[in-house]
Image: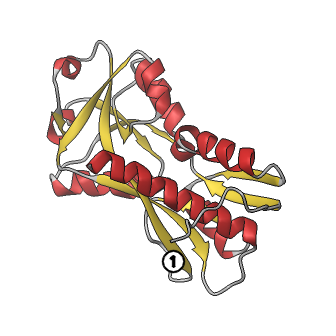
Amino acid sequence: RQAAFNINHKIEGKLRVGSFSSITALWMPDVIHFFTEHHPGVEVEVLDGNYNEIREWILHGQVDCGFLSSIVADDLTFYPLKEDPLCAVFPAFHPLAAKEEVCLEDTIPYKQIIFKKRSGLRHIIDGLFERIGQKPDVAYEIDEDQVAAGFVSNGFGICVAPNIPILQSLNVKILPLVSPSWQRNFYMAMLKNVYHPPVVEAFKNYVVEQAQKEWDYKTS
């Protein structure tokens, strides 16, 4: 059976991709590097935005495809890529930093950094607090993962967030959030029932194929 992604087939053109911060930092550099290395005639432009912006960009043709963490529109086709559990992030000197894992209820007595309502993560995290019948003691509302991580590292509060790469370089403690459990699913999204140029189809096939390889490796 012929592979979905053929690196020997010449592909040219411009590709516009909508992405959010954690995917842009963690996954996109390697994906774009490999894809353009084998297709030097392809120019890739990455637009970094929040989930609502990315969805609108796809729907209005401002990008050819985009990465989202939920299935949010009937006019889009969604390709599942990977899973990413949320964690709890603490300043290194925080009382909870000595634990091996944490429940959301453990965080209630402490000031928290949360994402603004326009963030795709906000409704997820609000839902987790609703499940335990509590509300966080909010110190600051932040737009971006990286900014929230910086606030935590400087002792302004704790944060429930994805385990983004920048956390590894900061003086913080990252603990698994074990209750209530939640896992984000990442998808590639494209507009339904429209013609997609070969460069877009090739990129989609490559991304889906690489995601499946990662999943097979982790579960084998």
Q: Which residue extends farthest top?
A: 93
Examine the image and state in which quarter residue 168 appears: top left
* Residue 152 in sight in this render: yes
In the image, 12: left or right of 183? right
The residue sitting at 78% across, 62% down in the picture is 11
Q: What amino acid type is highlighted by mark number 1?
A: Ala
Q: Could you say which is closer to the camera, residue 201 or residue 76?
A: 201
Q: Is residue 6 above or below residue 30?
A: below
Percent position (x, y) of residue 22? 51, 42
Examine the image and state in which quarter residue 127 appears: bottom left
- Looking at the image, how many numbered discs can be counted on the residues? 1
The residue sitting at 17% across, 34% down in the picture is 102
Q: Is residue 142 above or below residue 48?
A: above
In the image, 191: left or right of 156? right
Q: Which residue extends farthest front?
A: 1
The residue sitting at 84% across, 54% down in the picture is 41
Q: Is residue 55 above or below residue 173?
A: below
Percent position (x, y) of residue 125? 33, 51
* Residue 118 in sight in this render: no
Q: Could you say which is closer to the camera, residue 197 or residue 142?
A: 197
The residue under label 1 is 73
The residue sitting at 46% across, 54% down in the picture is 211
Q: Could you say which is closer to the camera, residue 154 or residue 140?
A: 154
Percent position (x, y) of residue 115? 45, 45
